[in-house]
Image (cartoon, rainbow, N blue to C red):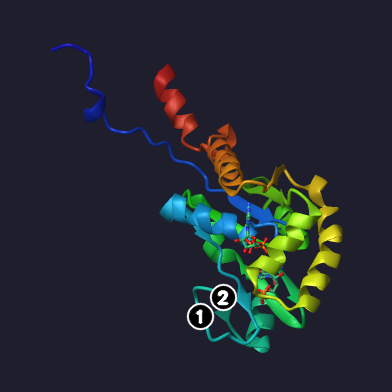
């Protein structure tokens, strides 16, 4: 018997880890939906999108429980009173909230969550969840490119595009409140940078809850 090992036969070491909350914001049209989708696809089950509760009417393309948990105002208010939300807000006359229970249990079990929220939601989540939160802000490479992406998406009328462009400047002024800022120029480059951020944050000592026992074992 030798003490050498065959790498392929060696069990992978996976230390228990606390999950994180990756919050991605950007001015509308800078690419947060595109980057979020790519990230969810690449990461599989290890990264889940948090599904919000809303009182907004369901749209024909939406699925209850996938896009949102749809509910009515009295039920939403009851959830607010019960402290069921990590944060909630009224947007365009409808109520939206991030349910606390699913995220709290998931984080303890090592599940990471992705949030696609604006700067106000990011601030509220950071306040509610502290060191579990990692915030990323995406910027467009130029104002002209932002406008061209909004038009190219083809989902909004001319008036809506102009409204979104007006709001973009105000949204961009919040860049310095984020942990990371990435310019979304070439999509694959931006995606690689966001994936690197996620990989590094997962390795943070404070998230690796299994290190205490592991190092104790090494030093025993
Ligand atoms: N604070 C907060 N905002 C949310 C939540 N879920 C969605 N929103 C925001 O509500 C706004 C409207 O979303 P939605 O009804 O899906 O309309 P859309 O922007 O046309 O897709 C967006 O700005 C979302 O970022 C949530 O759980 N909390
Ligand atoms: N790096 C990029 N280069 C070119 N087009 C992009 C890039 N990132 C996103 N887009 C396109 O720009 C449009 C807006 O992106 P989207 O992800 O919907 O933005 P947001 O969710 O921030 O509003 C979409 O049509 C998308 O395909």
Q: Secondary structure at mark 2?
A: loop
Instruction: Find residue 132 and report its horizontal and vertical position in percent.
Output: 62, 48
Tell me the number on the disc at residue 64: 1
- The reply to whether dot 2 and dot 1 touch (C-beta < 8 Å) is yes
Residue 118 visible in the picture: no
Residue tagged 2: 68
**Residue shown at 53% from the left, 48% from the top:** 19
**Residue shown at 77% from the left, 80% from the top:** 92
Q: Nearer the viewer, residue 2 or 93?
A: 93
Q: Nearer the viewer, residue 175 or 2?
A: 175
Can you say whether 87 is above or below 195 in the image? Answer: below
- Report the image quarter containing ligand 1: bottom right
Instruction: Find residue 165 and report its horizontal and vertical position in percent.
Output: 81, 65
Instruction: Find residue 33 and report its horizontal and vertical position in percent.
Output: 61, 61
Q: Secondary structure at mark 1?
A: loop
Respond yes or no on whether mark 2 lies under 8 Å from ligand 1.
yes
Residue 41 visible in the picture: yes
Can you say whether 193 is above or below 67 in the image? Answer: above
* Image-quadrant location for residue 24: bottom right
Rounded to the nearest angstrom, the CA distance separating label 2 from label 1 is 6 Å
Position of the N terminus by quadrant = top left
Position of the C terminus by quadrant = top left
Q: Is residue 76 left or right of residue 64?
A: right
């Amino acid at each position: 018997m030798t003490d050498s090992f065959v790498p392929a036969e060696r069990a992978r070491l996976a230390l228990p880890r606390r999950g994180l909350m990756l919050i991605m914001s950007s001015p509308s049209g800078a690419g947060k939906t595109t980057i979020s989708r790519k990230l969810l696809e690449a990461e599989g089950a290890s990264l889940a999108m948090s599904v919000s509760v809303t009182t907004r009417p369901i749209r024909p393309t939406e699925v209850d429980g996938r896009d949102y948990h749809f509910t009515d105002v009295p039920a939403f208010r009851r959830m607010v009173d019960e402290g069921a939300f990590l944060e909630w807000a009224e947007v365009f006359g409808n109520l939206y909230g991030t349910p606390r229970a699913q995220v709290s249990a998931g984080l303890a079990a090592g599940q990471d969550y992705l949030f696609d929220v604006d700067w106000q939601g990011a601030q509220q989540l950071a306040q509610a969840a502290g060191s579990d939160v990692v915030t990323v802000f995406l910027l467009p490479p130029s104002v002209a490119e932002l406008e061209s992406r909004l038009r190219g998406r083809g989902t909004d009328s001319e008036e809506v595009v102009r409204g979104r462009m007006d709001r973009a400047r105000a949204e961009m002024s919040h860049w310095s409140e984020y942990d990371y800022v990435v310019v979304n120029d070439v999509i694959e480059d931006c995606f690689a940078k966001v994936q690197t951020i996620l990989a590094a944050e997962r390795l943070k000592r404070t998230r690796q809850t299994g290190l205490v026992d592991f190092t104790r074992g090494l030093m025993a």
